[in-house]
Amino acid sequence: MDDEPLALNVLVEYCAQVPFLELKGRFHEALAAVEFLHENPVDVLFLDIHMPRLSGLQLAQLLPQPAPRIIFTTAHAQYAAESYELPALDYLLKPVRFERFVQAAHRAQAALRPTLAPTPTEPLEHADEVLFIRQDSRLHRVPVADLYYAEGQKEYLMLYTAAGRMLTLQSFRGLEELLPPGRFARIYRSYLINLRHLEFVERNRAQVHGTLLPIGETYREAFLEQLRFHGRAVKW
């Protein structure tokens, strides 16, 4: 659902190109979408946030139960932390790239599979828990849990991982779009950290896997709010 016709048309075209997606409806107006969803249950809802009369965040709280999995699509990055409280399965920033849309669709498909106990021969991580990083003309497989933090170096990123350092031609935004939502935080213009490996936070720096990194004033409040959301006590 999206109140912008061009953005909605893009999502419709993307849906048509993903074999396991079947489009059940498209809406420009929130209340019409709510009425349809009460009569026609769906598995996944692509939902804009910034809309007139009723926002996507408000609409999400009116959905019938069991509610569909929600993937937010918006041009406003500041809603990300609030969207995870619903919770959202994914958060796509406009203009939505097709490869990012496909990744979100696969994440929804994995989430909708029946939960089964893994056997000894089954992998313990889902496909969306692994990154493939290009370095030296090769794609290297990096488990998300093994990424400690990323450091920006002009048009490159230096990734610090359990297997060592990796230099790749990538932007912070491009990396953030590949990572699971809510589990990484930008703390400085040149640092993105994995909260799983955060050891402690001081007033202007954080230690991640034994390394002290600066916290920039621009990112400080959003970072602390993300820590509060994750249940960590933060007082200054």
Image: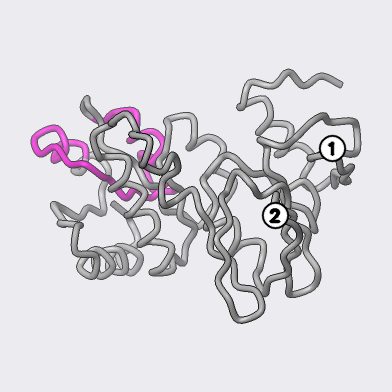
The residue at the point 30 percent across, 65 percent down is 5
Magenta highlight on residue 47: yes
Span of residues in magenta: 34-63
Compared across the picture, whether 201 is left or right of 62 comes to: right
Amino acid carrying mark 1 in the image: Ala
Which residue is farthest bottom? Answer: 137
Q: Which mark is residue 6?
A: none
Locate residue 187, reporting x and y percent.
77, 46
Secondary structure at numbered mark 1: strand
Q: Which mark is residue 206?
A: 1
Crowd around label 1: few <14 · some 14–19 · many ≥20 (10 Å): some
The residue at the point 56 percent across, 40 percent down is 182
Secondary structure at numbered mark 2: loop
Locate residue 142, reporting x and y percent.
58, 56
The residue at the point 84 percent across, 37 percent down is 207
Locate residue 191, reporting x and y percent.
78, 53
Residue ID for mark 2? 163
Comes first in the chain, label 1 or label 2: 2
